Image (cartoon, grey):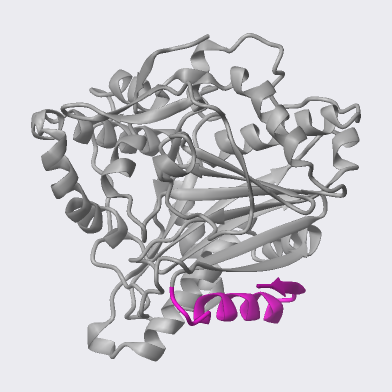
């Protein structure tokens, strides 16, 4: 199934307007095997699977009012992983593709421009590539929900911009505006040059983490979000005078596919932003309680649909829709700072526990997730779980590892054993 061109989905439209060398809109997934990677076999595997992912075999084009996606007929490439992680996608570097396949030693990584899709969709692409690679080296491996059968026909619904379809459907039934905190705290620090992006991993036992969160009657996502909020609150208290302190908020993506019965392989996540005001001394138990209540309220389908309608309305306002692309490119970065990055102090994205088929798990050692740089929040956190371990990565664009140092120290104090890698 080939489409000559596609509109960007509702969530993707902002990314080509704001991306830069410092805000790359790129994220990375990696799978580490217990066998060395052969470049030629990896490229063959990529060519074998791409027909099952036609919505990713595209390049970005400029229209009069919006960017759009066009079928990319250039050769696919794979690269040795020896450059800056999550760097900006430049057409001349990768034949115009919006993903970058990398290998080194036993590790396969793919970096994705967020224009293509969100974490859940893109991890399926990497798992499918890894599955095909193992098959080509002579290993019999099964398929599950994290892997596409490349011999099946492409489901037309995988192309869907579910965000816009559902937003339009509920336009007149979910009009309420949800509260958004603005002018939040951001950590200080001089941004590193565009050739540096520093990543720290914390590796821990999944059961240990789960049981620690359970002591607070919280999910792992609520627990880690609360810990991140407490970390940033403490940093603000240490670095900012009391009268100048601001609210602290964390952006948390919510995968909408199972909630709204979508199989879209494009962007279909919504973002909630639990927050704390700076004028109170919170115990960690109190922070957990506030975050839990926020999740309970804001992740109801009614509130998530209202947020979806809000986003859809913004895109469809005549001013936004009819403004020429050249002017959108000038104005959008300013709007993004005011109503986007200025509404959260950090991001935590938890892809959850990834379960591969048993015969494939024999060969897969770990699955990592890294978010690309943001010059406003300075640090971002990504979480992935695999087998009996959880991997937490912090990417940062400043020299000091203050956030991750405090965060992991707090985890240890709460009883979670953490192995740290830089």
Q: Point out residue 188 in the picture as x, y percentages from the top left corner.
A: 35, 80
Snapshot quadrant of residue 183 = bottom left
Q: Is residue 416 visible?
A: no
Q: Point out residue 148 in the picture as x, y percentages from the top left corner.
A: 68, 23
Residue pictured at 40% horizontal, 45% vertical: 90
Relative depth, front residue between 258 and 37: 37
Q: Is residue 103 visible?
A: yes
Residue pictured at 91% horizontal, 30% vertical: 139
Asked whether, in this view, residue 125 is left or right of residue 99, the answer is right
Relative depth, front residue between 36 and 335: 36
The mark total stands at 0
Relative depth, front residue between 21 and 421: 21
| Up-down relation of residue 257 to residue 333 (above or below) | above
Residue pictured at 34% horizontal, 28% vertical: 8
Snapshot quadrant of residue 216 = bottom right
Snapshot quadrant of residue 222 = bottom right
Identify the magenta region: 398-422
Q: Point out residue 162 in the picture as x, y percentages from the top left corner.
A: 41, 24
| Up-down relation of residue 285 to residue 325 (above or below) | below
Q: Point out residue 2 in the picture as x, y percentages from the top left corner.
A: 48, 11
Residue pictured at 65% horizontal, 67% vertical: 201
Asked whether, in this view, residue 294 is left or right of residue 408, the answer is left
Asked whether, in this view, residue 286 is left or right of residue 21, the answer is right
Q: Quadrant of the C terminus?
A: bottom right
The verdict on residue 331 being magenta is no
| Up-down relation of residue 330 to residue 157 (above or below) | below
């Amino acid at each position: 199934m080939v489409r000559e061109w596609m509109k960007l989905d509702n969530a993707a439209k902002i990314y080509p307007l704001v991306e830069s060398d410092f805000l790359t809109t790129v994220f990375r997934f990696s799978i580490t095997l217990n066998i060395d990677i052969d470049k030629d076999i990896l490229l063959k595997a990529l060519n074998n699977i791409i027909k099952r992912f036609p919505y990713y075999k595209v390049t970005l084009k400029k229209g009069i009012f919006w960017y759009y996606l066009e079928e990319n007929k250039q050769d696919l490439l794979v690269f040795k992983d020896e450059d800056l992680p999550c760097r900006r996608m430049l057409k001349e570097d990768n034949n115009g593709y919006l993903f970058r396949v990398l290998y080194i030693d036993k590790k396969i990584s793919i970096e994705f421009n967020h224009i293509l899709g969100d974490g859940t969709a893109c991890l399926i692409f990497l798992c499918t590539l890894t599955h095909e690679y193992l098959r080509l080296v002579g290993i019999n491996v099964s398929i599950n929900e994290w892997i596409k059968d490349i011999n099946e026909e492409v489901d037309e619904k995988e192309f869907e911009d579910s965000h816009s379809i559902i937003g339009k459907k509920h336009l007149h039934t979910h009009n309420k505006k949800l509260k958004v905190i603005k002018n939040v705290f951001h950590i200080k620090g001089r941004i590193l040059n565009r050739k540096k992006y520093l990543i720290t991993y914390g590796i821990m036992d999944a059961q240990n983490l789960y049981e620690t969160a359970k002591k607070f009657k919280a999910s792992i996502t609520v627990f880690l979000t609360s810990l991140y909020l407490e970390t940033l609150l403490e940093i603000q208290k240490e670095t900012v005078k009391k009268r100048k302190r601001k609210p602290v908020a964390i952006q948390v993506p919510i995968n909408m596919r199972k909630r709204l019965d979508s199989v879209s392989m494009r962007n279909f996540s919504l973002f909630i932003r639990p927050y704390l005001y700076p004028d109170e001394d919170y115990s960690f138990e109190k922070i957990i309680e506030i975050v839990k209540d926020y999740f309970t309220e804001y992740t109801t389908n009614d509130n998530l649909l209202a947020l979806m309608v809000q986003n859809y309305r913004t895109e469809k306002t005549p001013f936004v829709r009819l403004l020429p692309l050249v002017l959108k490119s000038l104005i959008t970065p300013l709007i993004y700072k005011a109503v986007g990055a200025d509404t959260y102090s950090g991001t935590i994205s938890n892809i959850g526990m990834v379960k591969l088929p048993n015969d494939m798990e024999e060969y897969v050692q770990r699955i990592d997730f890294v978010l690309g740089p943001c010059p406003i929040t300075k640090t971002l956190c990504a979480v992935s779980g695999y087998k009996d371990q959880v991997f937490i990565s912090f990417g940062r664009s400043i020299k000091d590892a203050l956030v991750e140092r405090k965060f992991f120290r707090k985890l240890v104090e709460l009883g979670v054993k953490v192995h740290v890698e830089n």
